[in-house]
Image: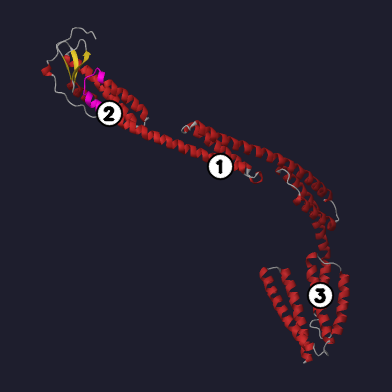
């Protein structure tokens, strides 16, 4: 380039001895130190032309107008340091994980420009630095390509897993699918798919289309099954609602009846029909069930109230029968069957005249009187059989059976006491007393036979 008249420049003999550039560290470049080293690889002649000194000789790089020879050489040395800093920047980018292909392209262009670069500096050293950078960049590019390929395979595998899970969900029997849970899972899979498309590696077009086709088909199949299932469920629920509305209507019509025995059985039948009927929708089913239970509650509350009133009315009868039962049990053990039969018959007549007792006491009272009646029957039978040669053997067997029965009743009494149920204790005690009296009667008969 044309320049103004140059200032005097140093003689060649005054140019410093060339110094090798320091290797690029891959982090920063000491600009001033590198400029100082670079100027040792150049000179300026008396005409102000600047040359770079290389192993193959000198090469003219240009002029710097209105400057001394030192300033001109320094100007072109700074241009060299800019190249050195560019190389350092590329090294930093590579170390930071930049694509190896990009660094290779930039480093190659920089390496090729050195032959004609209008700079002063250690071009051989910079070329070696760039050669090392190119080798590392190409190795990184190869590793990155391998990782990218592995990432594609992994991404394809993950999408395959998504597709298989979606196909599994869609392939289930509609009667066994948990629609809410499975539907939510399918939406999660779709969200995962979109996230992979957005942030994951791009798959080959053919692979992507094949996997998406399967995934889309699975989603469509699931949605079709869901619609069909709920359409059929709506039909099923409508039939259940119709049947249960009929059941509820009948239950409500019976709620005011006072025919407690007959209607109680009808309510049991209606409950059986309810259990066999198809389900309505949850909302309808709950509402209909509430009406059904309300009708039952009205009826059974009325029945319980009447029973409670009757039980209260029968308490006086219970007191009479309690006294009669005590009188009957006083006949035990029976020593004179004829006299005992006469007294028991009078007690039985009064028993019938006394009337009903509260339901909770019916079993206890009737069983108590039956025990005395059985004892009388056994005493009569024993008296009739006294002359029978086989009586002793039979009496002995009966005593043995009674002993076993008494042992069982004693155990039952202890269990009732442990349970704290006074009613059960009373019943067990009455049964045990009657059985012991019976046993005493047979024992006496056996003694008389001896």
Please name the residue shown 34% across and 29% down the image. Answer: 93
Identify which residue is drawn at 71% across, 39% down: 231
Q: Mark 3 and 1 residues: CB-CB less than 8 Å, in contact?
A: no
| Mark 2: secondary structure | helix
Residue 349 counted in the magenta span: no
Which quadrant holds residue 42? top left
Gap in Å between the C-alphas at discs 3 and 2?
A: 119 Å
- Residue at (25, 26) in percent of width and height: 127
Residue 165 circle label: 1
Badge 1 element: helix
Nearer the observer: mark 1 or 2; the answer is: 2
Pick out the residue farthest to the bottom.
450
Q: Which residues are magenta?
A: 115-130
**Would you say 48 lies left or right of 91 here?**
left
Q: Which mark is residue 370?
A: 3
In the picture as drawn, the residue positioned furthest to the left comes out as 13
């Amino acid at each position: 380039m044309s320049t103004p008249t140059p200032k005097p420049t140093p003689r060649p003999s005054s140019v410093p001895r060339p110094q090798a550039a320091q290797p690029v560290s891959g982090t920063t470049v000491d600009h001033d130190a590198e400029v100082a080293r670079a100027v040792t690889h150049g000179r300026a002649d008396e005409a102000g032309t600047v040359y770079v000194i290389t192993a193959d000789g000198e090469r003219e790089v240009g002029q710097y107008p209105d400057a001394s020879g030192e300033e001109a050489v320094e100007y072109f040395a700074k241009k060299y340091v800019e190249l050195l800093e560019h190389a350092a920047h590329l090294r930093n980018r590579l170390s930071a994980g930049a694509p190896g292909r990009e660094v290779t392209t930039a480093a190659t262009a920089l390496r090729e420009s050195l032959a004609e670069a209008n700079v002063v500096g250690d071009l051989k050293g910079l070329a070696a630095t760039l050669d090392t950078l190119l080798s590392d960049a190409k190795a990184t590019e190869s590793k990155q390509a391998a990782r990218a390929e592995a990432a594609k395979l992994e991404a394809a595998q993950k999408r395959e897993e998504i597709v298989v899970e979606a196909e599994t969900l869609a392939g289930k029997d509609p009667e066994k699918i948990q629609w809410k849970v499975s539907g939510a899972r399918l939406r999660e899979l779709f969200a995962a798919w979109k996230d992979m498309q957005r942030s994951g590696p791009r798959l080959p077009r053919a692979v992507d289309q094949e996997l998406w086709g399967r995934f889309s088909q699975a989603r469509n199949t699931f949605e079709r099954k869901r619609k069909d299932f709920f359409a059929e469920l709506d039909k099923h629920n409508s039939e259940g609602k119709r049947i249960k509305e009929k059941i509820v209507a009948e239950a409500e019509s019976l709620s005011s009846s006072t025919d407690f025995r007959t209607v109680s059985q009808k309510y049991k039948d209606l409950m059986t029909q309810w259990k066999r009927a198809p389900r309505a929708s949850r909302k309808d089913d709950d509402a209909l069930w509430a009406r059904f239970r309300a009708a039952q509650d009205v009826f059974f509350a009325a029945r319980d109230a009447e029973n409670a009133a009757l039980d209260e009315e029968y308490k006086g009868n219970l007191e009479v029968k309690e006294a009669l039962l005590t009188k009957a049990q006083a006949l035990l053990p029976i020593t004179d069957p004829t006299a005992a039969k006469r007294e028991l018959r009078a007690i039985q007549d009064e028993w019938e005249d006394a009337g009903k007792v509260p339901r909770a006491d019916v079993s206890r009272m009737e069983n108590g009187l039956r025990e005395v009646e059985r004892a009388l029957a056994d005493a009569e039978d024993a008296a009739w059989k006294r002359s029978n040669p086989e009586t002793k053997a039979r009496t002995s067997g009966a005593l043995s059976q009674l002993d076993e029965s008494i042992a069982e009743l004693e155990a039952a009494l202890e269990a009732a006491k442990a349970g704290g149920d006074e009613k059960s204790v009373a019943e067990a005690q009455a049964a045990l007393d009657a059985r012991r009296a019976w046993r005493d009667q047979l024992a006496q008969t056996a003694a008389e036979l001896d």
